[in-house]
Amino acid sequence: MNKAATDHLATAQAHANIALIKYWGKRRGNSDALNLPAVGSLSITLDALTTTTSVQFDDQLATDEACINNRRLQARELQRISNSLDLVRKRARQQGLTQIADRHARVVSDNNFPTAAGLASSASAFAALVTAAAAAAGLQLTDRALSVLARMGSGSAARSIYGGYVLMPRGQHDDGSDAVAQPLHDATHWPLRVLIAITDSGYKKVSSTLGMQQTMLTSPYFAAWVAAQEADLQQAAAAIAQRDFDRLAELAEHSCLKMHATALAAQPGVLYWNPASIACMQLIRDLRAQGHAVFFTNDAGPQIKAVCLPEAEATVSAALQTVTGVQSVLHSGLGGEARLLPA
Ligand code: PMV
């Protein structure tokens, strides 16, 4: 028996991802424990943004505990983590690993990027958490099973189980077994670069869960958003397969702006941008018009991601740093799948 199995301890690393075709909306609303998406999505995994998480099941603990970036979470902040641990404990019980089923866990998690900046930390966080927790419990789960568990923590986390270019289908089944991410190409297929312009490092996120709920309940555009998604996904997958940058640029900016337009039309409108976010988007469009291979995307926050070909990276980075309100620019390539670290 190896050390990890003896100590019921395991450590995993996962990368953040950004969607080029966005996930926005839940099939059965916010109270659905399966967390089924209303639409499929397509993302790239980012090598520079990493979460490293250790999980240890310990019979001495009276409750789950978690420390994130050296801060011990309060009981009320633990719920989502405990929910994911409960799913692993349930699987352990089903597989006769009864000593794990009744144990609480100690979770220690660190991001190598600014968490407060509202970057997609929940994707790498839940992918790393379920990968570490399953191994610590002694479960041997497929990537597919891990993607399902990650999805229940955060929809975008299902995609961070894989590296490179990742498709997350909406799925049809009521039990969510087909709402599971699948790798399309690894990072070497087309090594795009991603620059992240931080426009507000103290930003406190209006959670995607709340933003989606408001959009689903009140936006007159939500049905149209859902109806067009399959075509967007197919066209983006084809553009990626053909490495057609201009086509992918059009599709990704369209999906991003359409997601935000749908959210903006909610009542009250959900607005994630600040003036610097808009200035970055305009600048990126100007650069593309001048012949630089770059497009923007942006999630539920004010930071803007510029996706570019390697030859455009230096120009795009220098230009973003001149925008009033841009505090820093992070650089990333495309990264690999979630993985266990050696004990
Ligand atoms: O994974 P969640 O529930 O935080 O939702 C992510 C939503 C977006 O980041 C805005 C889009 C996406 O597909 O990642």
Image (tube, rainbow, N blue to C red):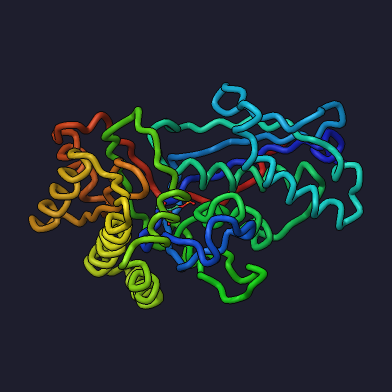
Is 9 on the left-hand or right-hand side of 145? right
User: What residue is shown at x 13% (from left), y 47% (from top)?
Assistant: 283
Question: Residue 324: where, in percent of width, then height?
Answer: 14, 32
> Which quadrant of the figure has residue 294?
bottom left
Question: Residue 191: where, in percent of width, then height?
Answer: 37, 55
Eyeballing the image, is 147 above or below 98? below
Eyeballing the image, is 103 above or below 145? above
Question: Residue 46: where, in percent of width, then height?
Answer: 43, 47
Is 138 on the left-hand or right-hand side of 106? right
User: What residue is shown at x 37% (from left), y 72% (from top)?
Assistant: 223
Residue 252: in sight, yes or no? no
Q: Tell me the quarter of the image containing the N terminus.
A: top right
Residue 176: in sight, yes or no? yes
User: What residue is shown at x 54% (from left), y 38% (from top)?
Assistant: 51
Is 275 on the left-hand or right-hand side of 268? left
> Which quadrant of the figure has residue 190?
bottom left
Q: Residue furthest left?
A: 290
The foreground one among 11 and 309 is 11
In this rendering, the count of numbered labels is 0
Q: Tell me the quarter of the image containing the C terminus.
A: top right
> Which quadrant of the figure has residue 214?
bottom left
The foreground one among 333 and 142 is 142
Question: Residue 132: where, in percent of width, then height?
Answer: 69, 42
User: What residue is shown at x 45% (from left), y 55% (from top)?
Assistant: 213
Is 26 on the left-hand or right-hand side of 12? left
